[in-house]
Image (spheres, helix red, strand yellow):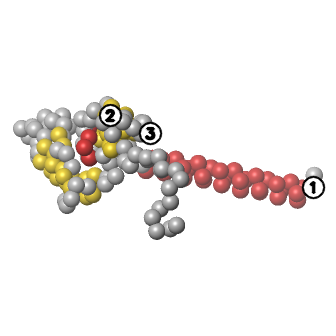
């Protein structure tokens, strides 16, 4: 290796080495600059858990509404608050507007009662609502098809 090339390689190595040292120093300073945040003191509160009323729609029986929350505690700063809520309009309200059920297919028509039924199992309860695990609903069977008389023509067509 020629002395000139050797000198250039030494300079390059020195430059890379100094750059590496500079980067390490910068990272170390950045780490040192970050002050460790003291852990937040956990406040022991005598406030109870929030208890929420059912969602009351602003108008009608579904859509946007509000619910009231209350909690107890001698030194609680806030013991009451109102929260916005929403009741989906396609939920079966007869089981509680905050209970969502997954329903099976409709059963066969009971000819004695002219009703068909189906069962739903609880899928979701909003805001810790108390919901039945399973529910059953019925509805009228609708028009029962009567056999059409054969061989007769409708009046006026023949």
Q: Residues within 10 Å of mark 3 (few under 14, many from 20)?
A: few
Q: Which mark is residue 112?
A: 2
Question: Is residue 122 at all visible to an observer of this figure?
Answer: no
Q: Could you say which is closer to the camera, residue 46 or residue 92? A: 92
Residue 118 percent coordinates (x, y):
37, 36
- Along the polypeptide, which appears first: circle 3 or circle 2? 3
Q: Could you say which is closer to the camera, residue 143 or residue 79? A: 143
- According to the picture, the residue beneath numbered tag 3 turns out to be 105
Is 155 situated above or below 145? below
Instruction: Measure the alpha-carbon separation of dots 3 and 2.
Output: 20 Å
SS at badge 3: loop
Instruction: Measure the alpha-carbon separation of dots 3 and 1.
Output: 90 Å
Q: Foreground mark, 1 or 2?
A: 2
Residue 104 percent coordinates (x, y):
43, 37
* Outermost left residue: 74
Is 44 situated above or below 35? above
- Along the polypeptide, which appears first: circle 3 or circle 1? 1
Q: Residue at x 53, y 53 (%)?
A: 151
Is 157 situated above or below 67? below
Residue 6 percent coordinates (x, y):
86, 54
Q: Residue at x 42, y 36 (%)?
A: 108
Left or right of 54 on screen, residue 14: right
Q: Could you say which is closer to the camera, residue 116 or residue 122? A: 116
Left or right of 26 on screen, residue 43: left
- According to the picture, the residue beneath numbered tag 1 turns out to be 2
């Amino acid at each position: 290796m020629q002395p000139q090339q050797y000198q250039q390689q030494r300079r390059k190595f020195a430059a890379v080495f100094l750059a590496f040292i500079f980067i390490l120093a910068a990272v170390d300073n950045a780490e040192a600059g970050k002050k460790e945040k003291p852990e937040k003191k956990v406040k022991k509160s005598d406030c109870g858990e929030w208890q929420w009323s059912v969602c009351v729609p602003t108008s009608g029986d579904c859509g946007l509404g509000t619910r009231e929350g209350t909690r107890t505690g001698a030194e609680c700063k806030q013991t009451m608050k109102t929260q916005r809520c929403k009741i989906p309009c396609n939920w079966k309200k007869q089981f509680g507007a905050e209970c969502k059920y997954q329903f099976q297919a409709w059963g066969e028509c009971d000819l004695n009662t002219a009703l068909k039924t189906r069962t739903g199992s609880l899928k979701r309860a909003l805001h810790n609502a108390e919901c039945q695990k399973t529910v059953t609903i019925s509805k009228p069977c609708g028009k029962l098809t009567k056999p059409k008389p054969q061989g007769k023509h409708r009046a006026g067509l023949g």
